[in-house]
Image (cartoon, coloured by chain):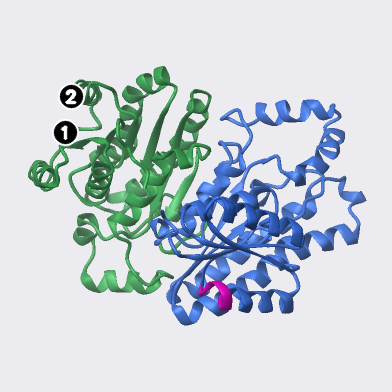
Chain colours: A green, B blue
Amino acid sequence: MESFEGQVVMVTGGATGLGAAMVERFALLGAGVACCFNKSQSAAEALAAKLSERGKETFLVRADVANGDQVKAAVKAVAEHFGKPTTVLINNAGDNLNPAPVDEMPEETWDQVIGINLKGAFLCAKYCIPAMKAARAGRVINITSISGRSGGGPGGAHYAASKGGLEAFTRALAKELAPYGITANGISPGVIYTPLHERTNTPESLERLRQNIPLLRLGEPMDVAGLAVFLASANASYITGEIIAVNGGLRMD
Amino acid sequence: MRLAGKVAVVTGGGSGIGATICRTFAIEGAVVAVTDIDRAAAEAVAGEIRIAGGAAQAWAFDVADAADVESAADEIEAQLGPIAVWVNNAGVSFIMPFLECTRTTWELTQRINLTGAFVGCQAAVRRMLPRGQGSIINMSSQSGRQGNSHYAAYCASKFGVIGLTQSVAIEFAGQGIRVNTLCPGVVFTPLWDKMIADYAAKHKMSPEAVQPYLESRIPMGRLCTREDVARAAVFLASDESAYITGQALNVNGGSVMS
């Protein structure tokens, strides 16, 4: 397996679910990993402790990705901690807050979800890109969702719209960064078993979902981490502007 | 090594992208069946892999001849072991004005690019089913995502490969077989040696101007290499992509995003 020694990988929403799997995977491959969290401080500390037992130090940094000042400070703190700036940015932070039909959805709910899922990716990219451009190397990986194309589940218009927007942002970013040798790609997970799905589904609804997945199983966070490792590696240096689905065959575009 | 001990069949393995996939798979530990309609070309690639310390053997067959493919697949399993990975890579490509595309050219293109993949998928699925695992990779193209003038036969065949991939993926996902497609951008291979003049004629430019013109239209500013494609094939063949099936992965430097 490729080594990520000397790389600095910043994962937003890194304390739980997919983010935690990616933090773990990149840390074990030798990268310096910044685990960016907002609300999940205890989960972030537990993850760092677990990795520390395996001899891997993780840098924990708190930021609300929807807040430009906080993102700017976090990106700076990561560079100072590792003595070099982020080389791989993984925009993973996301939420599906308070699902509701559009006519009943409070404007603040819409703004919050678009803020975390879409503006958050913009802000993190905005502040990480200058150093990548200077180095003429780097990777941006955006975690989108099957709902960005399918329209998502009941009450999830804000979530689906944010993820569809994130796909378009990924492609625009790819075109902008290609001349610098920086790639930008999206990973579009289907149903991955994470705290988010535990919260929004019952065991019965998860079982129904499972039966609709051609591979007949829910995804695991490590299924997504494997693709993130591939996209961040030299093996994927000619892949850019792509949205790659990890969904067990649930949707094929 | 990400493919240690896996038996991998690669069609069109005697030249171009196929040969690089064979070499790269061997470096990753696979036992490679290098297959090509040109026996000498397949033998040469297999021999080169063995000299480099890898495991490979050559077979010759026509990908669209089901009887030939099936008997070769039986031989491969008897000599190398159960087939874990099958890459339908063999292909032909012609650039010509649509009204000059003869029925013969159309049918040859569908026969090799699409029927060949169909026959290969059947041979692979038949053998993978009892073991409940396997990864099939069908070669499409950026021309399987977007049509192009002077390129109807090729584009139609490569769009077809994606439909074939999705259908077979859905039908056998529950039995542990994954099927995905790779869609490379322009790779200068022996196939292109013959096409550069036709491409130049289509765009009314000199043959020397073709490469800079193609590069200028690719966001990353360079053509796709055989290695770019082979490294993506390793990913799809390996367990790293265990939850990915029915997908078409573009490797094109950003030239077509879909």
Q: Residue A194 appears at what percent x and percent y?
A: 23, 57
Write down the region rendered in magenta: B77-82
Q: Residue A206 appears at what percent x and percent y?
A: 28, 69
Residue placed at 50% from the left, 26% from the top? Answer: A176
* Disc 2 secondary structure class: helix
Classify residue A51 as left or right of residue B92.
Answer: left
Could you tell me which chain the residue with mark 1 belongs to? A
Check disc 1: other Cα within 10 Å, few if <14, some if 14-19, many if 20+.
some
Amino acid at dot 2: His
Dot 2 corresponds to which residue?
Answer: A81
Classify residue B180 as left or right of residue A86.
Answer: right
Residue placed at 70% from the left, 59% from the top? Answer: B42
Residue placed at 86% from the left, 57% from the top? Answer: B105
Q: Quick one: B25 or B163, which is closer to the camera?
A: B25
Q: Residue B44 appears at what percent x and percent y?
A: 69, 54
Dot 1 corresponds to which residue?
Answer: A59
